[in-house]
């Protein structure tokens, strides 16, 4: 549900020639449709490489986990590799997850205007080839995971159950955004364990803070498809909350800040550096302020407003990344 929606159309005088096979909700001028080898384009579209904002929903929480762990025990040479590896792993796992999502949702996607141009419902890729593509991405991600310690490896493997479950969530629960949040923020636990070799309360609070953050932004995202979802019977928190959504968004926002604040205190307070703790807390509260500002500007009935607020998630998450990074330098 976090693949990037369609951008406003250009005027007829300035509209570029359509790219064969391009997905309707892809980012205009994306590199996949522009410069990637044509033979790979359908597979890169399956991985949502033409909608890059989704990659950040996995990368940012992973960096939270790594930087908070490094603040607690000190930066190590191996952390440079962990910082790179979680990015590579996020790209591959997001691609594999989106491929699996499209395989399971191909019949639903064919009935929705925004998604019927995707590679599977449009016939660009067969189900068999999509399965092979998903397997390649999972294998590469697993090879990267094997460079971590045993605790991180087992935590990473455990995420596969959530990845497999997510596409079916909207069929049996009104809370598929919760399952998505568990998926997208799992990197907090993997990165923390990759650095420390264990899991403690601090990363758990950061993890659940990320889950509430996902509930916030993906509920907003889901409001763009609420009419189609209603027609075909797909469940979402947007449909569940309806006109009460603004109140739920405030609850998710406050829960995010509360969980992040506790996680920061647990990670940074034992270090005995008050300035580092203060900077990290400012990061957690800065996330809340940024979400408050976005919520004040949001018109939940306007898809364009929902899209604008959804896209701001990268800025929100990077506030905490920047605060953690700065706290390591003081």
Image (cartoon, helix red, strand yellow):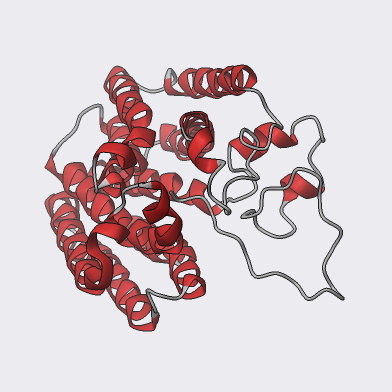
108 displayed left or right of 37: left
Q: Nearer the viewer, residue 103 or 36?
A: 103
Q: Is residue 32 above or below residue 257?
A: above
Q: Is residue 228 left or right of residue 286?
A: right
Residue 118, placed above or below residue 27: above
* Viewer-proximal residue among 70 and 3: 3
Where does the image place residue 2, in percent across and percent down from the top left? 45, 51
Is residue 272 shown left or right of residue 137?
left
Residue 265: % across, % down: 14, 57
Q: Residue at x 61, y 16 (%)?
A: 128
Figure check: 113 above or below 159:
below
Q: Residue at x 31, y 52 (%)?
A: 236
Given residues 259 and 278, the one toward you in this image is: 259
Identify the residue shown where x is 65% and y is 40%: 45
Q: Residue at x 31, y 48 (%)?
A: 235
Q: Quadrant location of residue 41?
A: top right
Q: Quadrant of the C terminus?
A: bottom left
The x, y position of residue 43, in whole percent, is 67, 32
């Amino acid at each position: 549900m976090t693949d990037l929606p369609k951008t406003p159309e250009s005027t007829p005088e300035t509209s570029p020639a359509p790219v064969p096979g391009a997905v309707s909700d892809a980012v205009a001028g994306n590199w996949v449709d522009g410069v990637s080898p044509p033979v790979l384009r359908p597979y890169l579209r399956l991985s949502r490489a033409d909608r890059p904002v989704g990659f950040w929903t996995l990368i940012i929480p992973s960096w939270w986990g790594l930087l908070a762990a490094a603040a607690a025990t000190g930066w190590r040479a191996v952390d440079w590799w962990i910082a790179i590896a979680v990015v590579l792993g996020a790209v591959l796992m997001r691609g594999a997850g989106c491929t699996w999502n499209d395989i399971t949702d191909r019949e639903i996607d064919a009935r929705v205007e925004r998604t019927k141009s995707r590679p599977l419902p449009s016939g660009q890729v067969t189900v068999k080839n999509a399965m092979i593509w998903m397997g390649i991405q999972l294998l590469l991600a697993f090879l990267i995971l094997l460079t971590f310690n045993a605790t991180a490896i087992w935590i990473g493997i455990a995420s596969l159950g959530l990845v497999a479950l997510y596409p079916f969530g909207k069929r049996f629960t009104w809370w598929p955004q919760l399952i998505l949040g568990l998926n997208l923020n799992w990197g907090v636990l993997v990165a923390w364990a990759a650095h420390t070799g264990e899991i403690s309360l601090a990363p758990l609070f950061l993890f659940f803070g990320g889950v509430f953050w996902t509930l916030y932004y993906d509920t907003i995202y889901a409001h763009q498809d609420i009419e189609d979802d209603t027609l075909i019977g797909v469940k979402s928190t947007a449909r569940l909350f309806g006109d009460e959504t603004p109140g739920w968004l405030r609850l998710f926002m406050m829960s995010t800040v509360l969980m992040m604040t506790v996680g920061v205190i647990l990670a940074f307070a034992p270090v005995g550096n008050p300035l580092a703790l203060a900077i990290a807390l400012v990061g957690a509260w800065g996330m809340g302020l940024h979400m408050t500002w976005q919520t004040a500007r949001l018109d939940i009935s306007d898809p364009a407003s929902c899209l604008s607020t959804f896209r701001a998630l990268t800025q929100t998450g990077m506030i905490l990344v920047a605060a953690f990074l700065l706290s390591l330098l003081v």
